[in-house]
């Protein structure tokens, strides 16, 4: 399968921890990357190689993976973390890429 | 600074064609695989196509295969997307993105150009 499945919406109280998940068969063989997108802005890479953060991304963002599920965790969510989050990986051929449907994160 | 700037979007009738461009600056364009990604209004990201750094291989999403052609001119640091037989469902913001081989992720994105397919 070349699909990646995400929950459409998740909410978290300010300062609490939230996990956003991404499921797909291809994740058993390929790493996921995660992108944050705020309204009217280009996506920003927040996690790559399932667990690594680019420079400039706060350490409250972390990634993990197990089996066919990749996860993005925000520990101590801030108001500025409110955004859409997308996972991305390769399909089984390795040549095509696929995005999850996106998760809208609301910080209460 | 490292930048991608798209151009060429606009309003086009169904069945017509449009060519998008993506100008790269401040990095060695010829060293990177380049992608097009689109986002329909109010919808999620959709991968469209990739072209390898040397142009030797190209791959397309099933939704555009046979209608869209990705190309590049490394001497001009420019990526292209030729879109033919456009449909209403192709209406979206089209963005180019750099794929880092080291990270295996999109590390640089353009701001996108809007394509509206409507009669």
Image: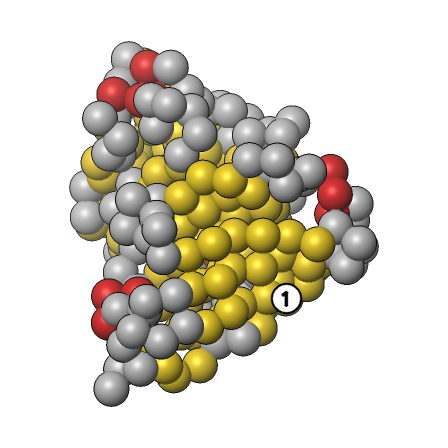
Q: Quadrant of residue A94?
A: top left
Colour scheme of the picture: secondary structure
Q: Quadrant of residue B33?
A: top right
Residue at left 24%, top 34%? Answer: A3
Q: Is residue A87 left or right of residue B53?
A: left
Residue at left 34%, top 48%? Answer: B65
Q: Is residue A16 above or below residue A63?
A: below
| Residue farthest to the bottom, as pictured | B119
Q: In which quadrant will I find the C terminus of chain A? A: bottom left
The residue lying toward the viewer, choosing from A7 and B24, is B24
Q: Which residue is mark 1?
A: B5
Q: Is residue A29 above or below residue B117?
A: above
Q: In which quadrant will I find the N terminus of chain A? A: top left
Q: Is residue A66 above or below residue A61?
A: above
- Position in image of residue A73 (x %, y %): 37, 33
Give SS at disc 1.
Answer: strand
The residue lying toward the viewer, choosing from B16 and B59, is B16
- Position in image of residue B37 (x %, y %): 44, 53
Q: Quadrant of residue B92?
A: bottom left
The residue lying toward the viewer, choosing from B58 and A56, is B58
Residue at left 34%, top 28%? Answer: A91
């Amino acid at each position: 399968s070349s699909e990646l499945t995400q929950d459409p919406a998740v909410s978290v109280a300010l300062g609490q921890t939230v996990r956003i998940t991404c499921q797909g068969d291809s994740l058993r063989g390929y790493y996921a990357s995660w992108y944050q997108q705020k309204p009217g802005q280009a996506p920003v890479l927040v996690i790559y190689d399932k667990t690594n953060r680019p420079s400039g991304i706060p350490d409250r963002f972390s990634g993990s993976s197990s089996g066919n599920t990749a996860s993005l965790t925000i520990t101590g969510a801030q108001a500025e973390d409110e955004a859409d989050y997308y996972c991305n990986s390769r399909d089984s051929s390795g040549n095509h890429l696929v995005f999850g449907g996106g998760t809208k994160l609301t910080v209460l | 600074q490292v930048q991608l700037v798209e151009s060429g979007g606009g309003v086009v009738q169904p069945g017509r064609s449009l060519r998008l461009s993506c100008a790269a600056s401040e990095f060695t364009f010829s060293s990177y695989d380049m992608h097009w990604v689109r986002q329909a209004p109010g919808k999620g990201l959709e991968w469209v196509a990739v072209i390898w750094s040397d142009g030797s291989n190209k791959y397309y999403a099933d939704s555009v295969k046979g209608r869209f052609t990705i190309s590049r001119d490394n001497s001009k640091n420019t990526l292209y997307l030729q879109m033919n037989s456009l449909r209403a469902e192709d209406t979206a913001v089209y963005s180019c993105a750099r794929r880092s081989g080291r990270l295996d992720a999109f590390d640089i994105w353009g701001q996108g150009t809007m394509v509206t397919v409507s009669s």
